[in-house]
Amino acid sequence: MRTMTVIGAGLIGTSVALAVSRAGVTVHLADRDPAAVRVAAALGAGHARGPAAPVDLAVLAVPPSQVAAVLADAQERGIARAYTDVASVKAGPEQAALHHAPDPARYVGGHPLAGRERSGPLAARAELFHDRNWVLTPSRLTSDAAFERALELVALCGAVPVVMRSRDHDAAVAVTSHVPHLLASLMAARLGEGPAGLDRVAGQGLRDATRVAGGDSRLWSDILQANAGAVADVLRELHTDLSRLVPAVDALARSGGPDRELGMRTLVDLLDRGVSGRARLPGAAPGGDGRHTVRVAVDDRPGELARLFAAVAGLGVTAEDAAVNAPAEAGLTVRFAVPQPTADRLVAALAAGGWDAVPEWAAHTPRAPVGPVG
Protein backbone atom coordinates (compact mmCIF):
# COMPACT_ATOMS: atom_id res chain seq x y z
CA MET A 1 0.00 0.00 0.00
CA ARG A 2 1.41 3.34 -1.09
CA THR A 3 -1.47 5.80 -0.78
CA MET A 4 -4.38 6.28 1.57
CA THR A 5 -7.14 8.77 2.31
CA VAL A 6 -8.39 9.20 5.87
CA ILE A 7 -11.82 10.81 6.11
CA GLY A 8 -12.25 12.14 9.64
CA ALA A 9 -9.31 13.82 11.37
CA GLY A 10 -10.29 13.05 14.94
CA LEU A 11 -8.51 10.87 17.51
CA ILE A 12 -8.77 7.57 15.65
CA GLY A 13 -8.44 8.88 12.10
CA THR A 14 -5.39 10.99 12.91
CA SER A 15 -3.81 8.11 14.86
CA VAL A 16 -4.28 5.84 11.83
CA ALA A 17 -2.75 8.49 9.58
CA LEU A 18 0.23 8.99 11.90
CA ALA A 19 0.89 5.25 12.10
CA VAL A 20 0.80 4.57 8.36
CA SER A 21 2.69 7.77 7.51
CA ARG A 22 5.57 6.48 9.64
CA ALA A 23 5.52 3.36 7.49
CA GLY A 24 6.01 5.42 4.34
CA VAL A 25 2.43 5.56 3.08
CA THR A 26 1.33 8.85 1.52
CA VAL A 27 -1.78 9.95 3.39
CA HIS A 28 -4.39 12.48 2.31
CA LEU A 29 -6.62 13.93 5.02
CA ALA A 30 -10.23 15.04 4.81
CA ASP A 31 -12.72 16.32 7.38
CA ARG A 32 -15.75 18.58 7.37
CA ASP A 33 -13.81 20.74 9.84
CA PRO A 34 -10.88 22.32 7.94
CA ALA A 35 -9.19 23.21 11.22
CA ALA A 36 -8.99 19.53 12.21
CA VAL A 37 -7.30 18.71 8.91
CA ARG A 38 -4.78 21.51 9.38
CA VAL A 39 -3.95 20.37 12.89
CA ALA A 40 -3.57 16.73 11.82
CA ALA A 41 -1.34 17.74 8.91
CA ALA A 42 0.78 19.90 11.21
CA LEU A 43 1.27 16.84 13.43
CA GLY A 44 2.72 14.98 10.45
CA ALA A 45 -0.32 12.79 9.79
CA GLY A 46 -0.54 13.56 6.08
CA HIS A 47 -1.43 16.12 3.42
CA ALA A 48 -4.28 18.58 3.77
CA ARG A 49 -5.29 18.10 0.16
CA GLY A 50 -7.08 15.47 -1.87
CA PRO A 51 -5.27 12.90 -4.03
CA ALA A 52 -4.88 13.39 -7.77
CA ALA A 53 -5.78 9.75 -8.46
CA PRO A 54 -7.61 6.95 -6.62
CA VAL A 55 -5.71 5.82 -3.52
CA ASP A 56 -5.14 2.22 -2.45
CA LEU A 57 -7.39 2.47 0.60
CA ALA A 58 -9.85 4.96 2.10
CA VAL A 59 -10.35 4.82 5.87
CA LEU A 60 -13.67 6.25 7.05
CA ALA A 61 -13.06 7.56 10.57
CA VAL A 62 -16.58 8.86 11.18
CA PRO A 63 -19.34 7.98 13.68
CA PRO A 64 -21.44 4.85 12.96
CA SER A 65 -24.46 6.79 11.72
CA GLN A 66 -22.34 8.52 9.06
CA VAL A 67 -20.46 5.53 7.67
CA ALA A 68 -23.03 4.57 5.03
CA ALA A 69 -23.44 8.09 3.60
CA VAL A 70 -19.70 8.80 3.60
CA LEU A 71 -18.98 5.43 1.97
CA ALA A 72 -21.57 5.98 -0.76
CA ASP A 73 -20.24 9.47 -1.49
CA ALA A 74 -16.61 8.30 -1.55
CA GLN A 75 -17.40 5.40 -3.88
CA GLU A 76 -19.44 7.60 -6.20
CA ARG A 77 -16.42 9.88 -6.48
CA GLY A 78 -14.12 6.87 -6.96
CA ILE A 79 -11.52 8.09 -4.47
CA ALA A 80 -10.11 4.64 -3.59
CA ARG A 81 -9.73 1.04 -4.72
CA ALA A 82 -10.85 -0.32 -1.33
CA TYR A 83 -12.68 1.07 1.69
CA THR A 84 -12.86 0.34 5.41
CA ASP A 85 -14.11 2.15 8.50
CA VAL A 86 -13.19 2.30 12.19
CA ALA A 87 -16.63 2.72 13.77
CA SER A 88 -17.39 0.77 16.95
CA VAL A 89 -20.72 -0.55 15.61
CA LYS A 90 -20.66 -2.83 12.58
CA ALA A 91 -24.01 -4.45 11.70
CA GLY A 92 -25.86 -1.26 10.75
CA PRO A 93 -23.11 0.18 8.53
CA GLU A 94 -22.66 -3.22 6.88
CA GLN A 95 -26.34 -3.54 6.01
CA ALA A 96 -26.44 0.02 4.71
CA ALA A 97 -23.38 -0.66 2.56
CA LEU A 98 -24.93 -3.81 1.11
CA HIS A 99 -28.08 -1.91 0.15
CA HIS A 100 -26.84 1.55 -0.80
CA ALA A 101 -23.11 1.60 -1.58
CA PRO A 102 -22.32 1.63 -5.31
CA ASP A 103 -19.74 -1.18 -4.89
CA PRO A 104 -20.11 -3.07 -1.56
CA ALA A 105 -17.50 -5.63 -2.63
CA ARG A 106 -14.81 -2.98 -2.10
CA TYR A 107 -15.84 -2.38 1.54
CA VAL A 108 -14.92 -4.23 4.73
CA GLY A 109 -15.98 -3.10 8.20
CA GLY A 110 -13.32 -2.52 10.83
CA HIS A 111 -13.02 -1.57 14.49
CA PRO A 112 -9.67 -1.01 16.25
CA LEU A 113 -10.11 -1.76 19.96
CA ALA A 114 -8.17 1.26 21.14
CA GLY A 115 -9.00 4.76 22.17
CA ARG A 116 -8.64 7.44 24.80
CA GLU A 117 -11.02 9.50 26.89
CA ARG A 118 -9.77 12.57 25.01
CA SER A 119 -10.92 13.39 21.48
CA GLY A 120 -9.63 15.37 18.50
CA PRO A 121 -6.40 15.25 16.50
CA LEU A 122 -4.24 16.60 19.33
CA ALA A 123 -5.02 13.45 21.33
CA ALA A 124 -3.83 11.19 18.48
CA ARG A 125 -0.89 8.82 18.91
CA ALA A 126 0.86 6.78 16.21
CA GLU A 127 1.32 3.92 18.69
CA LEU A 128 -2.34 3.91 19.79
CA PHE A 129 -3.08 0.57 18.09
CA HIS A 130 0.18 -1.24 18.89
CA ASP A 131 -0.57 -4.82 20.02
CA ARG A 132 -4.31 -4.03 20.25
CA ASN A 133 -6.96 -6.17 18.60
CA TRP A 134 -8.49 -4.77 15.41
CA VAL A 135 -11.76 -6.43 14.41
CA LEU A 136 -12.58 -6.88 10.72
CA THR A 137 -16.12 -7.81 9.69
CA PRO A 138 -16.16 -8.74 5.99
CA SER A 139 -19.63 -9.13 4.55
CA ARG A 140 -20.76 -11.87 2.19
CA LEU A 141 -19.84 -9.55 -0.71
CA THR A 142 -16.45 -8.29 0.47
CA SER A 143 -13.78 -9.06 -2.12
CA ASP A 144 -10.47 -10.71 -1.29
CA ALA A 145 -8.65 -7.61 -2.52
CA ALA A 146 -10.55 -5.31 -0.14
CA PHE A 147 -9.99 -7.69 2.77
CA GLU A 148 -6.26 -7.88 2.04
CA ARG A 149 -6.03 -4.07 2.04
CA ALA A 150 -7.72 -3.96 5.43
CA LEU A 151 -5.34 -6.59 6.77
CA GLU A 152 -2.42 -4.53 5.50
CA LEU A 153 -3.76 -1.47 7.31
CA VAL A 154 -3.96 -3.45 10.56
CA ALA A 155 -0.37 -4.62 10.11
CA LEU A 156 0.90 -1.11 9.36
CA CYS A 157 -0.68 0.10 12.61
CA GLY A 158 0.95 -2.71 14.60
CA ALA A 159 -2.39 -4.20 15.61
CA VAL A 160 -3.67 -7.79 15.79
CA PRO A 161 -6.39 -8.71 13.26
CA VAL A 162 -9.52 -10.48 14.51
CA VAL A 163 -12.32 -11.59 12.18
CA MET A 164 -15.93 -11.64 13.41
CA ARG A 165 -19.48 -11.46 12.13
CA SER A 166 -20.80 -7.93 12.45
CA ARG A 167 -23.68 -8.88 14.74
CA ASP A 168 -21.44 -10.98 16.99
CA HIS A 169 -19.11 -7.99 17.25
CA ASP A 170 -21.94 -5.64 18.23
CA ALA A 171 -23.26 -8.02 20.89
CA ALA A 172 -19.78 -8.35 22.36
CA VAL A 173 -18.90 -4.64 22.48
CA ALA A 174 -22.27 -3.89 24.11
CA VAL A 175 -20.92 -5.83 27.11
CA THR A 176 -17.26 -4.80 26.94
CA SER A 177 -17.53 -1.14 25.93
CA HIS A 178 -20.93 0.45 25.37
CA VAL A 179 -22.74 -0.45 28.59
CA PRO A 180 -19.59 0.14 30.70
CA HIS A 181 -19.52 3.66 29.27
CA LEU A 182 -23.14 4.20 30.30
CA LEU A 183 -22.42 2.87 33.80
CA ALA A 184 -19.37 5.14 34.12
CA SER A 185 -21.55 8.09 33.14
CA LEU A 186 -24.25 7.11 35.64
CA MET A 187 -21.67 6.87 38.42
CA ALA A 188 -19.99 10.13 37.40
CA ALA A 189 -23.40 11.86 37.40
CA ARG A 190 -23.74 10.97 41.09
CA LEU A 191 -20.67 13.08 41.81
CA GLY A 192 -22.53 16.24 40.87
CA GLU A 193 -25.50 15.33 43.03
CA GLY A 194 -23.89 13.63 46.05
CA PRO A 195 -23.05 14.88 49.54
CA ALA A 196 -20.52 17.59 50.29
CA GLY A 197 -16.88 16.59 50.65
CA LEU A 198 -16.79 14.07 47.80
CA ASP A 199 -13.60 15.59 46.42
CA ARG A 200 -11.81 14.89 49.71
CA VAL A 201 -12.48 11.16 49.73
CA ALA A 202 -12.39 10.34 45.99
CA GLY A 203 -9.70 7.72 45.38
CA GLN A 204 -8.18 5.96 42.39
CA GLY A 205 -10.95 3.37 42.29
CA LEU A 206 -13.53 6.05 41.55
CA ARG A 207 -11.27 7.64 38.94
CA ASP A 208 -10.84 4.26 37.23
CA ALA A 209 -14.58 3.56 37.32
CA THR A 210 -15.51 6.94 35.81
CA ARG A 211 -12.56 7.61 33.48
CA VAL A 212 -14.39 6.93 30.21
CA ALA A 213 -17.29 9.16 31.26
CA GLY A 214 -15.22 12.09 30.01
CA GLY A 215 -15.71 11.02 26.39
CA ASP A 216 -17.47 13.13 23.76
CA SER A 217 -21.19 12.90 24.54
CA ARG A 218 -22.24 13.50 20.91
CA LEU A 219 -20.03 10.70 19.62
CA TRP A 220 -21.14 8.32 22.34
CA SER A 221 -24.82 9.04 21.83
CA ASP A 222 -24.29 8.17 18.15
CA ILE A 223 -22.53 4.92 19.07
CA LEU A 224 -25.17 3.90 21.60
CA GLN A 225 -28.13 4.56 19.34
CA ALA A 226 -26.44 2.62 16.55
CA ASN A 227 -26.13 -0.42 18.83
CA ALA A 228 -29.26 0.22 20.88
CA GLY A 229 -30.69 -3.29 20.58
CA ALA A 230 -27.62 -5.06 21.98
CA VAL A 231 -27.15 -2.37 24.64
CA ALA A 232 -30.76 -2.73 25.79
CA ASP A 233 -30.29 -6.51 26.17
CA VAL A 234 -27.33 -6.01 28.51
CA LEU A 235 -29.12 -3.28 30.46
CA ARG A 236 -32.06 -5.62 31.06
CA GLU A 237 -29.68 -8.21 32.54
CA LEU A 238 -28.16 -5.55 34.77
CA HIS A 239 -31.63 -4.43 35.79
CA THR A 240 -32.39 -7.99 36.91
CA ASP A 241 -29.27 -8.04 39.07
CA LEU A 242 -30.05 -4.62 40.54
CA SER A 243 -33.60 -5.68 41.33
CA ARG A 244 -32.11 -8.39 43.54
CA LEU A 245 -29.30 -6.26 44.95
CA VAL A 246 -31.32 -3.27 46.16
CA PRO A 247 -33.61 -5.21 48.55
CA ALA A 248 -30.60 -7.25 49.70
CA VAL A 249 -28.70 -4.10 50.72
CA ASP A 250 -31.88 -2.65 52.25
CA ALA A 251 -32.12 -5.77 54.43
CA LEU A 252 -28.49 -5.35 55.54
CA ALA A 253 -29.17 -1.72 56.45
CA ARG A 254 -31.76 -2.79 59.00
CA SER A 255 -30.53 -3.65 62.48
CA GLY A 256 -32.28 -6.98 62.53
CA GLY A 257 -34.76 -9.14 60.70
CA PRO A 258 -34.95 -12.49 58.96
CA ASP A 259 -33.86 -11.11 55.59
CA ARG A 260 -30.33 -10.12 56.63
CA GLU A 261 -28.84 -13.57 56.01
CA LEU A 262 -30.45 -13.79 52.57
CA GLY A 263 -29.27 -10.26 51.83
CA MET A 264 -25.69 -11.17 52.72
CA ARG A 265 -25.79 -14.30 50.55
CA THR A 266 -27.09 -12.25 47.63
CA LEU A 267 -24.37 -9.65 48.08
CA VAL A 268 -21.57 -12.23 48.34
CA ASP A 269 -22.90 -14.04 45.28
CA LEU A 270 -22.78 -10.86 43.23
CA LEU A 271 -19.26 -10.03 44.39
CA ASP A 272 -18.07 -13.57 43.64
CA ARG A 273 -19.61 -13.39 40.16
CA GLY A 274 -17.73 -10.14 39.64
CA VAL A 275 -14.43 -11.71 40.65
CA SER A 276 -15.07 -14.66 38.33
CA GLY A 277 -16.10 -12.45 35.41
CA ARG A 278 -13.12 -10.13 35.71
CA ALA A 279 -10.76 -13.12 35.67
CA ARG A 280 -11.79 -13.70 32.05
CA LEU A 281 -10.30 -10.39 30.93
CA PRO A 282 -6.87 -10.40 29.27
CA GLY A 283 -4.32 -9.07 31.72
CA ALA A 284 -6.64 -9.26 34.72
CA ALA A 285 -3.99 -11.18 36.65
CA PRO A 286 -0.34 -10.10 36.92
CA GLY A 287 1.48 -11.37 33.87
CA GLY A 288 -1.74 -12.06 32.02
CA ASP A 289 -1.07 -9.47 29.33
CA GLY A 290 2.08 -11.17 28.05
CA ARG A 291 4.57 -9.18 30.14
CA HIS A 292 7.56 -10.75 31.86
CA THR A 293 7.11 -12.06 35.38
CA VAL A 294 9.86 -11.96 37.97
CA ARG A 295 9.49 -14.44 40.82
CA VAL A 296 11.05 -13.55 44.16
CA ALA A 297 11.34 -15.80 47.21
CA VAL A 298 10.80 -13.89 50.45
CA ASP A 299 11.34 -15.06 54.02
CA ASP A 300 8.16 -15.07 56.05
CA ARG A 301 9.45 -12.55 58.58
CA PRO A 302 7.96 -9.24 59.75
CA GLY A 303 8.98 -6.39 57.46
CA GLU A 304 10.43 -8.50 54.63
CA LEU A 305 7.75 -7.59 52.12
CA ALA A 306 8.13 -3.92 52.96
CA ARG A 307 11.90 -4.26 52.46
CA LEU A 308 11.35 -5.90 49.06
CA PHE A 309 8.95 -3.18 47.88
CA ALA A 310 11.41 -0.53 49.02
CA ALA A 311 14.15 -2.27 47.01
CA VAL A 312 12.13 -2.22 43.77
CA ALA A 313 10.65 1.27 44.15
CA GLY A 314 13.63 2.90 42.46
CA LEU A 315 12.77 1.00 39.26
CA GLY A 316 9.22 2.31 39.22
CA VAL A 317 7.80 -1.03 40.42
CA THR A 318 5.16 -0.97 43.15
CA ALA A 319 3.04 -3.35 45.19
CA GLU A 320 0.30 -2.96 42.53
CA ASP A 321 2.56 -4.84 40.11
CA ALA A 322 2.84 -7.76 42.53
CA ALA A 323 0.93 -10.89 43.46
CA VAL A 324 1.84 -12.71 46.67
CA ASN A 325 1.39 -16.42 47.33
CA ALA A 326 1.77 -17.98 50.77
CA PRO A 327 2.38 -21.73 50.28
CA ALA A 328 1.87 -24.21 53.08
CA GLU A 329 5.58 -24.33 53.79
CA ALA A 330 7.48 -21.40 55.22
CA GLY A 331 8.19 -18.41 53.02
CA LEU A 332 6.34 -16.24 50.51
CA THR A 333 6.48 -16.09 46.72
CA VAL A 334 6.11 -12.67 45.11
CA ARG A 335 5.59 -12.30 41.36
CA PHE A 336 6.09 -8.93 39.69
CA ALA A 337 4.49 -8.49 36.23
CA VAL A 338 6.45 -5.81 34.37
CA PRO A 339 7.60 -4.95 30.82
CA GLN A 340 10.64 -6.88 29.59
CA PRO A 341 13.23 -4.07 29.96
CA THR A 342 12.07 -3.46 33.53
CA ALA A 343 12.13 -7.22 34.24
CA ASP A 344 15.78 -7.45 33.18
CA ARG A 345 16.76 -4.52 35.40
CA LEU A 346 14.64 -5.86 38.25
CA VAL A 347 16.33 -9.27 38.25
CA ALA A 348 19.78 -7.69 38.16
CA ALA A 349 19.02 -5.21 40.95
CA LEU A 350 17.43 -7.79 43.22
CA ALA A 351 20.20 -10.30 42.67
CA ALA A 352 22.77 -7.63 43.54
CA GLY A 353 20.81 -6.97 46.73
CA GLY A 354 20.87 -10.60 47.79
CA TRP A 355 17.30 -11.49 46.82
CA ASP A 356 16.38 -14.83 45.22
CA ALA A 357 14.88 -13.45 41.99
CA VAL A 358 14.12 -15.59 38.94
CA PRO A 359 12.66 -14.36 35.63
CA GLU A 360 9.69 -16.20 34.16
CA TRP A 361 8.11 -15.68 30.75
CA ALA A 362 4.45 -14.93 31.30
CA ALA A 363 2.47 -16.74 28.65
CA HIS A 364 0.46 -14.52 26.35
CA THR A 365 -3.25 -14.46 26.95
CA PRO A 366 -4.71 -16.14 23.85
CA ARG A 367 -5.95 -13.72 21.24
CA ALA A 368 -8.60 -14.40 18.69
CA PRO A 369 -6.61 -15.18 15.52
CA VAL A 370 -7.32 -14.30 11.95
CA GLY A 371 -9.68 -16.93 10.67
CA PRO A 372 -12.75 -17.57 8.59
CA VAL A 373 -15.88 -15.61 9.31
CA GLY A 374 -18.20 -17.63 11.52
Image (cartoon, helix red, strand yellow):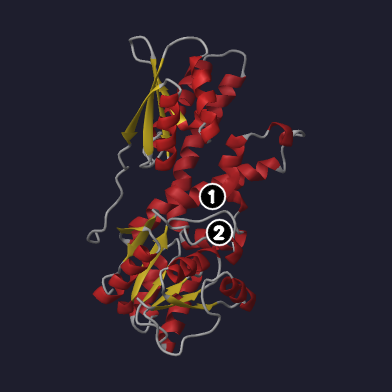
Write down the quadrant of residue 288 in the picture: top left
Inspect the image, locate mark 2, and give the three-letter code of the amino acid beneath it.
Trp
| Rendered residue at 48%/70% (across/down) | 17
Quadrant of res 44: bottom right
Q: Quadrant of the C terminus?
A: bottom left
Q: CA distance from mark 1 to mark 2?
A: 9 Å
Q: Amino acid at mark 1?
A: His
Front-most of residues 229 and 43: 43
Q: Which mark is residue 200?
A: none
Q: Quadrant of the N terminus?
A: bottom left
Query: Visible in this render: residue 278?
Result: no
Percent of width and height locating residue 5? 45, 78
Dots 1, 2 in contact, CB < 8 A: yes
Residue that label 2 marks? 220
Out of 38 and 163, give the one closest to the viewer: 38
Residue 171, horizontal then vertical, whole percent: 38, 53
Q: Residues within 10 Å of mark 1 (few under 14, many from 20)?
A: many
Q: Secondary structure at mark 2?
A: helix
Residue at the spot 29% in from the left edge and 71% down from the top edge: 147
Report which residue position mark 1 lands on: 181
Classify mark 2: residues with Cα within 10 Å, few (<14), some (14-19) or many (20+): some
Q: Earlier in the sequence, mark 1 or mark 2?
A: 1
Looking at the rendered structure, the secondary structure element under dot 1 is helix
Q: Position of residue 263 (x, y in %)?
A: 50, 22
Q: Nearer the viewer, residue 344 or 139?
A: 344
Q: Identify the residue shown where x is 48% and y is 46%.
A: 235
Q: Is residue 255 left or right of residue 279?
A: right
Residue 305 seen from this side? yes
Q: Is residue 51 above or below residue 285?
A: below
Location of residue 99 (image quadrant): bottom left
| Image x and y of residue 186, in percent | 60, 45
Q: Tell me if residue 351 comes above or below residue 326 in the rendering.
A: below
